[in-house]
Amino acid sequence: MGYPHSHSLEVVTLLSRHFGDESARRLETWTTYGGYAALRLAVGLEPSEITGIVKESGLRGRGGAGFPTGLKWSFMPQEPDGPHYLCCNADESEPGAFKDREILRWVPHLLIEGCLIAARGIRAEHVYIYVRGEYFPYTRILNDAVVEAYEAGYIGQNIMGSGWDCELTVHIGAGAYIAGEETGLMSSLVGGRAEPRVKPPFPAQSGVFGRPTTVNNVETLAAVPMIMTEGAEWYRQWGTEQSPGTKLWSCSGHLERPGTYELPLGVPFRDIIYDVCGGIPGGKKLKAVIPGGSSTALLTADELECESTYEGMQEAGSSLGTASPIVMDEDTNIVRVIRRTAEFYAHESCGQCIQCREGTAWMAKILHRIETGEGRLADLDTLYELCEQLTGRTICVLADSIVFPVRSSLDKFRADYEALIGGRE
């Protein structure tokens, strides 16, 4: 968490400035840091003005897809004929990701303020923060902050004397990974099973309780207050033209200094691993890295010369995802890593789609067979065929999520598979 050491990259602490400061959780302290000044500014603006500022900033969704935030807000109906809703997706369940947890843990009021500004921008009358069930300790911190914000008049009726009303509810999930998918989240929120649904209709047309809804990630919403107070151009001084701003990185695996780091988008990916995180322990070589959380394609040691941006990772053949690199040293059993990843996705499949329900289970079984020395070369062809059958054939992208690591591992580390198979046909 933060920077307990020095490195050569530019240190920018916009979101993480108060990480580690327990007093920042309290409203009394937070307001001395400028907390809720952005909300005071926002309640004096028209919703279209708020959306316009965020659109100009180039802020992209930090939950994995990287969709332009302001553009997403603009999809909401401009003339409400009933309630609008904002859902903050705090169901951080991607293996390797823990950046949103730090926001909930240290700066809950920053998130609350961002939610309220976003709600103002999309004309929402109620905010739901959907928190991962396993994040119970951080939910308590968030709930305490919500109570403080209500008592101070930042949430509820006639916010800051503006005549605008907005309620906020913290909802605890039940531990299903699939609830992180926006339509699955909304289904769970209203009491249904966390099952994704076919789109269209899109959430901006029919979401929570069948009403227009926007779903944004924790980190996305936490960036909104500073954009409101400092301006779009200020935010764009960091990052690149297509990927502006800073990004929180959840760095784990075989690293000297794993943790959560905030960096401008666009820094060389290799430098994050070797400079910021100190490289591989024991002087070992890097074998592979999953750059954006478990659902992204593996990169080898020779593929690290890329920009840490949405477009840079795509050019490298992977994805920025949740910016949660999992680093593996030269002694790592790649097949074991992929088998465990496949078992996770097989377990977390909601079961609606046959391809996902059966395909992920078959992948896990085949990978287990290979890992235990009972595999055959024909199993590799079957895995490739499963990758083809799972891609783009399901309601949500959970099936695609396991395809990326499986296919990339087969392409780049086939020798590891063949060594365990031992020539058996």
Image (spheres, rainbow, N blue to C red):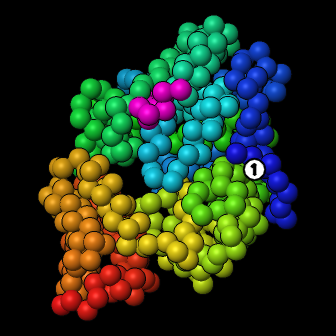
In what quadrant of the picture does the C terminus appear? Answer: bottom left
Residue matched to label 1: 235
Q: Camera-side residue: 268 or 169?
A: 268
Q: In this view, does 265 lie above or below 373?
A: above
Q: Is residue 247 visible?
A: no
Q: What residue type is labelled 1?
A: Tyr
Q: Residue 399 location, x and y as percent?
A: 29, 61
**Residue occupying the point 78% across, 49% down:** 3
Quadrant in which residue 410 is drawn: bottom left
**Residue occupying the point 73% across, 26% down:** 22
Magenta-highlighted residues: 127-137
Instruction: Count how many numbered circles sit on residues in the image.
Output: 1
**Residue occupying the point 70% across, 57% down:** 257
Q: Is residue 10 visible?
A: yes
Q: Camera-side residue: 46 or 110?
A: 110
Secondary structure beneath dot 1 equals: helix
Q: In this view, does 101 lie above or below 61?
A: above
In the displayed structure image, the side of residue 315 where residue 294 appears, left or right: left
Q: Residue 285 location, x and y as percent?
A: 63, 78
**Residue 134 among those drawn in magenta:** yes
**Residue 142 among those drawn in magenta:** no
In the displayed structure image, the side of residue 217 where residue 366 appears, left or right: left
In the displayed structure image, the side of residue 162 where residue 199 appears, left or right: left
In what quadrant of the picture does the N terminus appear? Answer: top right
Q: In this view, does 189 lie above or below 147?
A: below
Q: Camera-side residue: 394 or 398?
A: 398
